[in-house]
Image (cartoon, rainbow, N blue to C red):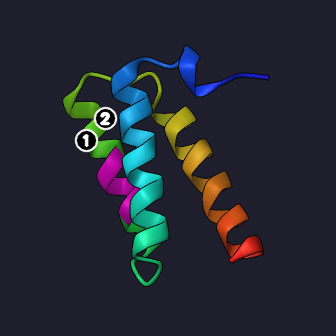
Amino acid sequence: GWSLSRLPKVLEALLRAAISEMISYPETSTGIIISEYLKLAESFNILKENSFINAILDKVHKELLLNG
């Protein structure tokens, strides 16, 4: 029961970019994509949300595999 509009704009942008990369470059390892965006989140001092980011991107990856 949450929406993207409740997230900080920087976090929303990171998630959108990571998901776009997963869709656009399916041959790239998801682990690498997630790792890079977690590092990017750290550069914006979004440290507390790393587990959230990881969980969301992992869930999106699994959905892409099922529906891809």
Q: Marks 1 and 2, how far apart in space? A: 4 Å
- Count the labels in the image: 2
Disc 1 and disc 2 in contact, CB within 8 angstroms: yes
Q: Which mark identifies residue 7? A: none
At x 47% / y 26%, what residue is drawn?
Answer: 49
Quadrant position of the C terminus in the picture = bottom right
**Residue 37 appears at what percent x and percent y?**
34, 48
**Residue 7 appears at what percent x and percent y?**
51, 19
**Residue 12 appears at what percent x and percent y?**
44, 31
At x 38% / y 62%, what residue is drawn?
Answer: 33
Q: Nearer the viewer, residue 45 or 8?
A: 8
Is residue 44 in the magenta section?
Answer: no
Q: Amino acid at mark 1?
A: Leu
Quadrant position of the N terminus in the picture = top right
Q: Which mark identifies residue 41? A: 2
**Mainly helix, strand or loop, the magenta region?**
helix
Q: Nearer the viewer, residue 55 or 25?
A: 25
Q: Quadrant of residue 14?
A: top left
**Residue 45 appears at what percent x and percent y?**
26, 22
Q: Amino acid at mark 2?
A: Ala
Task: Give the class, few, some or many, for how many residues have Cα within 10 Å of label 1's Cα (few <14, many ≥20).
Answer: few
Q: Which residues are magenta?
A: 33-37
Q: Which mark identifies residue 40? A: 1
